[in-house]
Amino acid sequence: MAAKRKRPTRDQLAEQYGISVPSVDRAKKAGVDVYDMEAMLEYLQNRQRPGKPDNSPTGQDLNTARTKLVNLQCEKLKIAIQKDRGELLDKVTVDDAMYRLGLLNRMAWDKLPDELPPMLEGLTAAKMKSKLMPFARLKQKEFHEGQGLEE
């Protein structure tokens, strides 16, 4: 039986979303599922600010700037949460892994000329093919096992 996951407290939710505890309470009163990240981020992007709407050109610019800021904060928070969940990786981590795989692949290809000539000596093209395919599969398997990968 799987252990039931504990739901975060109001304080933890407020910290996770970068808002105050009363803001979490207001979202809950507005009918938002505060435990659903997508629903909460949508609520935060679309919520109305307290006070009267300001229709002056400066006020509209300020409201636009606030809206952009909230949208950017929500996107930043969404990315941080996805990183915490392991859904996203840093580019540096991926680049390093790809470099290592490429290096190992190159090393495997560099070894082939030493191993192939004795194996193919005196064979016709048809017989070479029957020897090369199992050899290629064996090398692929060795490469994958060396990387901890599965075919």
Image (cartoon, helix red, strand yellow):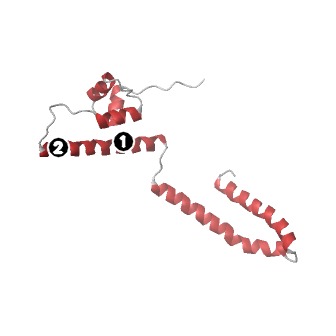
Judge whether residue 18 can be spotted in this image.
no
Q: Nearer the viewer, residue 56 or 110?
A: 56
Q: Is residue 96 toward the left or the right of residue 24 in the image?
A: right
Instruction: Relative to 123, say whether 75 is above or below.
Output: above
Residue name at image x 87 percent, y 75 percent: 124
What residue is shown with label 2? 60
- The residue type indicated by label 2 comes to Gln
Name which quarter of the figure residue 143 lies in.
Answer: bottom right
Q: Nearer the viewer, residue 126 or 52?
A: 52
Seen as rendered, the residue at the extreme bottom is: 122
What residue is shown with label 1? 77
- The residue type indicated by label 1 comes to Leu
| SS for callout 2 | helix
Residue name at image x 59 percent, y 64 percent: 102
Instruction: Relative to 151, say whether 11 is above or below.
Output: above
| SS for callout 1 | helix
